[in-house]
Image (cartoon, helix red, strand yellow):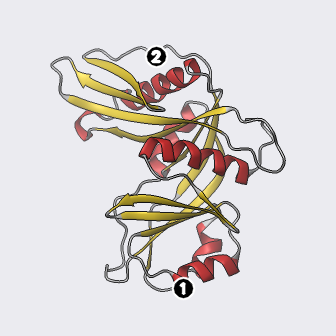
């Protein structure tokens, strides 16, 4: 994607790859963004607003009745949280980031091995110890960047997702290994741009690998029966 791509264009590209990675339904256009059927018990569907306006957020949050509806607002939390009605819970913040892809040849740390495979537009990577025990995993979705604003091109983009390292194997370079391996596989598949929404912790890793921050994201979920608090986060 071009460097001058707008946040709404980047968000649309991100949700395209995200839905492939998660096996979710195609995004349904809305006046304020997109709705996506996810189909998980604790993630029934989500509304994505790339440029949230107060009237839209208030209408959505006040009109929601389905528990485990999620809201992704690409703006600073401090600006959008005052617009949210009762029954909503604040999840961990996210950060929309992009990276130009190139071939990568990361070294595998001693004592580990990595396996990759492709299935239906999704690339998966698995890191195991020498004796086969789980150490880390990650995946990405490949999808055309749906053009917005009159653009006619639709380049392939890659969206890394669900990057995870087992606690006992952290701080050994496995996160970098996973990301660089997935980036290489995406480039080999024809993608030239990667996009993701990372957590605060993940942002430090991605920044060290050359990713650029494009927008903050506030993440919320709805369940009036749940006490105030944050569940395990995720984009």
Side of 22 relative to 99 (left or right): left
Q: Secondary structure at mark 2?
A: loop
Q: Secondary structure at mark 1?
A: helix
Task: Quadrant for residue 75, please give it.
Answer: bottom right
Side of 23 relative to 48 (left or right): left
In the current view of this chain or complex, which residue is farthest to the left? 131
Residue sitting at 39 percent across and 30 percent down? 124
Mark sitting earlier along the chain (1/2): 1
Side of 22 relative to 35 (left or right): left
Residue sitting at 55 percent across and 33 percent down? 208
Residue pointed to by mark 2: 106
**Quadrant into which the N terminus falls:** top right
Residue pointed to by mark 1: 62
**Residue nearest the observer in this picture, 210 or 141:** 141
Q: Residue 135's x, y, as percent?
A: 26, 31
Q: Pointer 1: residues within 10 angstroms few (<14), some, or many (20+)?
A: some
Q: Residue 22's x, y, as percent?
A: 42, 46
Q: Residue 95's x, y, as percent?
A: 57, 51
């Amino acid at each position: 994607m071009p460097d001058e791509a707008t946040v709404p264009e980047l968000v649309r590209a991100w949700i395209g790859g995200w839905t492939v990675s998660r096996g979710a339904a195609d995004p349904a256009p809305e006046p304020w963004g997109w709705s996506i059927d996810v189909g998980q018990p604790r993630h029934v569907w989500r509304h994505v607003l790339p440029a949230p306006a107060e009237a839209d957020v208030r209408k959505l949050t006040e009109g929601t009745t389905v528990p485990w509806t999620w809201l992704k607002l690409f703006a600073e939390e401090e600006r959008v949280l005052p617009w949210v009605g009762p029954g909503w819970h604040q999840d961990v913040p996210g950060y929309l980031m992009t990276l130009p892809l190139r071939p990568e040849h990361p070294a595998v740390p001693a004592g580990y091995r990595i396996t990759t495979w492709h299935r239906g537009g999704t690339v998966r990577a698995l890191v195991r110890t020498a004796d086969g025990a789980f150490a880390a995993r990650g995946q990405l979705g490949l999808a055309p960047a749906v053009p917005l604003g009159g653009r006619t091109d639709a380049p392939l983009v890659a969206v890394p997702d669900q990057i995870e390292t087992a606690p006992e194997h952290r701080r050994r370079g496995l996160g970098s290994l996973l990301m660089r391996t997935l980036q290489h596989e995406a480039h080999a598949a024809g993608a030239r741009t990667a996009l993701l929404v990372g957590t605060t912790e993940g942002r430090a890793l991605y920044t060290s690998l050359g990713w650029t921050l494009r927008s903050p994201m506030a993440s919320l979920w709805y369940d009036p029966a749940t006490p105030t608090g944050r569940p395990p986060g995720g984009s």
